[in-house]
Image (cartoon, rainbow, N blue to C red):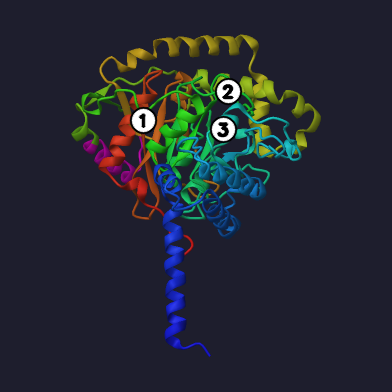
Amino acid sequence: MISRRVFTGSILASVALRAADDGLAFASVDEASALLRRRKVSPVELTRLCLDRIEKLNGKLNAFVTVTAELALDQARTLESEGRAGKWRGPWHGVPIALKDLYDTAGVRTTAGSKQWIDRVPSEDAEVVQRLTAAGAILLGKLNMDEFAYNFTGETSAFGTSRNPWNVERSPGGSSGGSAVAVAAGMCFAALGSDTGGSIRLPAALCGITGYKPTYGAVSTAGVAPLAWSLDHVGPMSRSARDAALMMEALTGRAVRETAVNVKSLRLGVPRTPFYNDIDVEVSKAVADATDTLRRITAGVRDVASPDLAPSKDLPMLPESYTRVIGAEAYAFHQEMLKAHADRYHSGTRKSIEGGAAISAADYIRARRGMERLRAESGRLFSGADLLITPTAPGAAFEFGMGRLVFLRNTAPWNLLGLPAVSIPCGFTTGGLPIGLQITGASGRDDAVLALAEAYQKATDWHTRHLSLLL
């Protein structure tokens, strides 16, 4: 018979072990990399930790649609052997990640969250996947998403709805909802999302993580299912801006962190209209507090002019050029599949795609010319400021079925202009839901955007807060 003392001790030891695992699951990439290099933990152990969390949590959160457990463990064993032999690939060596399910993966299905591609198995990895695996990242699997990335609520996937780990009755945002959930719940150390109107930044804000949309064209989209070629951006979803910078370096092969950005010299601008219109009171307060912090660590904050973007006649929360470009390009990609198997789409996706059929070639050309003009003139936005500060979204995570296009109002303009933008956590509502702050820079100033985001995170701890879901 086990004594009460021994039984109690074993329970406490078990709880302590789970607490330690829970803490490790939320380590930064830097922290995990340091442990791996010192052999305090192995790539296999780190991979098994993530796989264990996926097994325990995915039934509740539905973040993963495909788990590549054997592949991940094989990669981990190879990287462990390399480490013992003194071969080190860099900070991603032995770190488990996951991919939004629109990235081609050789021998592993890529569905884009759609029945159209439910059995599609690519023969090659997307270019960015090749870069990450070459850098030593371990692939845990593919993440849930809105069908073909054409929604922002997480409700149109063929695999069902992903759920926000802070409140499972609320949306994690979309279309990269599964990516945000997986990072927020400690199922992986970072993930890749994609962003055509806010699909990285909105889920990052609603799930309390860091989501980065680079300058248009900075990261290859080869082997990534498109939504709209002229607006699509590939980018990292991670715990911190520093982790996002580390992933950007792996994705591009160019230094981000080593560039000389003096945060104290940065001038910050606040474009009030429409970005601050009709903002939830708690979001307004959190963003104001964050702005005060940024004022202390930079050269100051001032109001600046907003971009002059004509609103769409049909969808006034979004710019006219944006809605024309995304509608026409999405229809062009889906036209043949729509004719062949319209019934395989979610009804909401099909309706969005069909709307693009009414956009004439002349309308599209005018919209594209307008977009190119806006991009060429976007430098004017930064004549009085180096970076722009806005809320990422007007509110916190909404209930399923309650998503409104106003949640893309603050993010979509930067896709139209092709500018780098990041969402970072800056507070919580009284109901315990995360709030996101958006920092936007001039074209090519990815270094400044990430430097300010990292400086803010050094001055605050919002990005370190997480749920102990296993305890």
Q: Is label 2 in contact with label 3 (beta carbons under 8 Å)?
A: no
How many residues crowd around disc 3 within 10 Å: few (fewer than 14), some, or many (20 or more)? Answer: some
Q: Position of residue 253 (x, y in %)?
A: 48, 24
Q: Amino acid at mark 3?
A: Ala
Return the residue at label 2: 326
Mark 2 and mark 3: Cα distance apart in space: 33 Å
The residue drawn where x is 50% and y is 44% is 180
Instruction: Specify the quadrant of the image occupied by residue 176.
Output: top right
Pick out the residue farthest to the right.
340
Q: Amino acid at mark 2?
A: Ile
Give the magenta part as a residue range: 276-293
Of the two numbered discs 1 and 3 in the rendering, the one whose residue sits closer to the viewer: 3
Q: Position of residue 383 (x, y in %)?
A: 28, 14
Of the two numbered discs 2 and 1 in the rendering, the one whose residue sits closer to the viewer: 1
Instruction: Specify the quadrant of the image occupied by residue 61.
Output: bottom right
> What kind of element bears circle 1?
helix
Above or below 107: residue 267 = above
The residue drawn where x is 31% and y is 40% is 457
Q: Is residue 207 left or right of residue 384?
A: right
The first of marks 1 and 3 along the sequence is 3
Q: Position of residue 406 (x, y in %)?
A: 45, 35
Q: Amino acid at mark 1?
A: Leu
> Which of the two residues, 271 or 269, is positioned nearer the viewer here?
269
Return the residue at label 3: 134
Magenta stretch contains residue 408: no
Mark 2 and mark 1: Cα distance apart in space: 27 Å
Return the residue at label 1: 450
Q: Position of residue 302 (x, y in %)?
A: 22, 25
Q: Is residue 2 left or right of residue 354?
A: left
> What kind of element bears circle 2?
helix
> What kind of element bears circle 3?
helix
